[in-house]
Image (cartoon, rainbow, N blue to C red):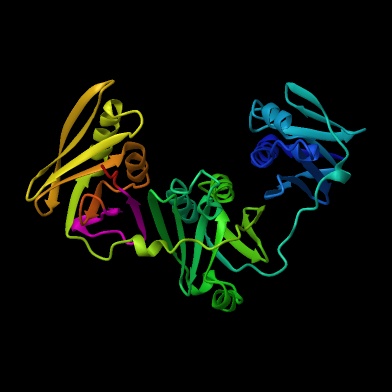
């Protein structure tokens, strides 16, 4: 194998692949990245048997061939190579030789014959979405996926299919995020109507969606999504991710979302985020409790926290309250900060019915108009 490639192209492919590899002591080959030179492309592949990725890179191929190299070593080396230089890549005797302006490396590889065969989509794409728009919605819901494997379905992201929309949702039982992405007639493949008539939803591992979102750049084009039996494929700018689907039934989370609210508050997002971050310094280390105090007809909201170890903190920020009586709602400070960080609008709306039920956060446009394509729910701490 012998080829020439731009350092930034080669580096991007290796760094994307490196994030996929895992420490598998029973299958050491999985700690390697597969390099395949064929025709006018260099394919860079990696898998941990749950997620796989294949990056197809432009290159000047002088001699075809393939070799598997340790992902961590290749990634660490290329992280220190500047962009804009040409790189000579050659494999001889299961050894990779990398030469660029002012730098040379020799990396010991292994025989590529033991590397798993990467699956490919067996049908046309199901639908496609604008890359940055998909990334924005994916990042918004990912924070709410469960980290614990106790209920495996909660470690995934719910993909719900409607005639003209894709719904992404995640919950860990303490919070919930739901985002809606519109699908136009030109966004769906010919098999989409038939597919959704048989499949209303699937569960995609959160880590898969995280890696897909991470690989999308500002200049990325469309994300094409293919779904096969127990697998999903994401194609972005000549990068193909493949992942298993989580087998199970996602909770009926929509039942948690209140249909109406008896109380609501409009408040500056940055004002509230800053007050909560400050209050977090004084919150109890175990409960992480921060309280919001909202009065009927009041133009101010209080944010309070206290603990035996550190003391207490009280802050007051302006708000527009449409509540009944006095409401004291206690939150886990981390969940509250995550919710506020998922928004970009200057003002957020907080809707609730009492101090113990689900509290809904939404972005606000001008004149108190709520943005309907995303919501974030945080369950209060019950004392």
Where residue 95 appears, x then y in whole percent? 87, 31
Q: Is residue 193 magenta?
A: no
Residue under the image location 17 percent in, 56 percent down:
263
Q: Is residue 71 left or right of residue 374?
A: right
Q: Quadrant of the C terminus?
A: top left
Where residue 325 appears, x then y in whole percent? 9, 51
Residue under the image location 36 percent in, 57 percent down:
374
**Residue, far right:** 93
Span of residues in magenta: 357-379
Q: Is residue 344 left or right of residue 355?
A: right
The image shows residue 106, relative to residue 213, as above or below, that is above
**Residue, far left:** 297
Q: Is residue 15 left or right of residue 117?
A: left
Q: Nearer the viewer, residue 35 or 343?
A: 343
Residue under the image location 73 percent in, 25 percent down:
101
Where residue 79 appears, x then y in whole percent? 64, 29
The image shows residue 117, relative to residue 190, as above or below, that is above
Residue under the image location 67 percent in, 36 percent down:
11
Q: Is residue 375 left or right of residue 62?
A: left
Q: Is residue 369 magenta?
A: yes
Query: How many labels, in total?
Result: 0
Where residue 32 appears, x then y in whole percent? 77, 37
Residue 220 appears in the figure? no
Q: Nearer the viewer, residue 12 or 137?
A: 137
Residue 41 appears in the figure? yes
Q: Nearer the viewer, residue 35 or 317?
A: 317
């Amino acid at each position: 194998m012998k080829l020439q490639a731009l350092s930034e192209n080669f580096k991007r492919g290796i760094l994307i692949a490196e994030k996929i590899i895992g420490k598998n002591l029973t299958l050491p080959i999985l700690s390697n990245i597969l390099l395949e030179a064929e025709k006018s492309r260099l394919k860079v592949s990696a898998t941990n048997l749950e997620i796989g990725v294949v990056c197809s890179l432009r290159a000047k191929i002088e001699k075809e061939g393939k070799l598997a190299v340790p992902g961590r070593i290749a990634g660490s080396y290329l992280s220190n190579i500047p962009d804009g230089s040409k790189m000579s890549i050659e494999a001889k005797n299961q050894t990779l030789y990398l030469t660029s302006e002012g730098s040379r490396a020799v990396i010991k590889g292994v025989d590529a014959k033991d590397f798993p065969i990467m699956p490919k989509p067996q049908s046309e794409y199901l639908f496609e979405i604008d890359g940055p728009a998909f990334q924005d919605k994916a990042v918004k819901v990912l924070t709410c996926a469960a980290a614990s494997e106790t209920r495996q379905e909660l470690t995934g992201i719910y993909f719900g299919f409607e005639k003209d929309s894709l719904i992404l949702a995640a919950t860990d039982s303490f919070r919930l995020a739901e985002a809606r992405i519109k699908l136009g007639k030109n966004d769906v493949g010919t098999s989409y109507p038939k597919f959704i008539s048989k499949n209303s939803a699937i569960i995609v591992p959160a880590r898969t969606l995280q890696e897909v979102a991470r690989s999308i750049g500002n200049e990325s084009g469309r994300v094409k999504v293919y779904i096969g039996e127990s697998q999903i494929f994401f194609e972005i700018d000549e990068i193909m991710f493949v992942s298993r689907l989580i087998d199970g039934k996602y909770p009926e989370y929509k039942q948690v979302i209140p249909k109406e609210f008896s109380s609501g508050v409009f408040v500056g997002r940055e004002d509230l985020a800053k007050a909560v971050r400050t209050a977090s310094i004084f919150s109890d280390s175990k409960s992480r409790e921060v309280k919001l105090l909202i009065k009927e007809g009041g133009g101010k909201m209080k944010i309070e926290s206290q603990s035996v170890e550190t003391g207490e903190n009280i802050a007051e920020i302006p708000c527009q309250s449409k509540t009944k009586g006095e409401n004291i709602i206690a939150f886990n400070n981390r969940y509250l900060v995550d919710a506020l960080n998922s928004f970009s609008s200057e003002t957020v709306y907080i809707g609730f019915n009492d101090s113990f039920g689900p509290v809904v956060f939404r972005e606000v446009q001008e004149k108190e108009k709520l943005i309907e394509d995303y919501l974030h729910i945080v369950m209060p701490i019950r004392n």
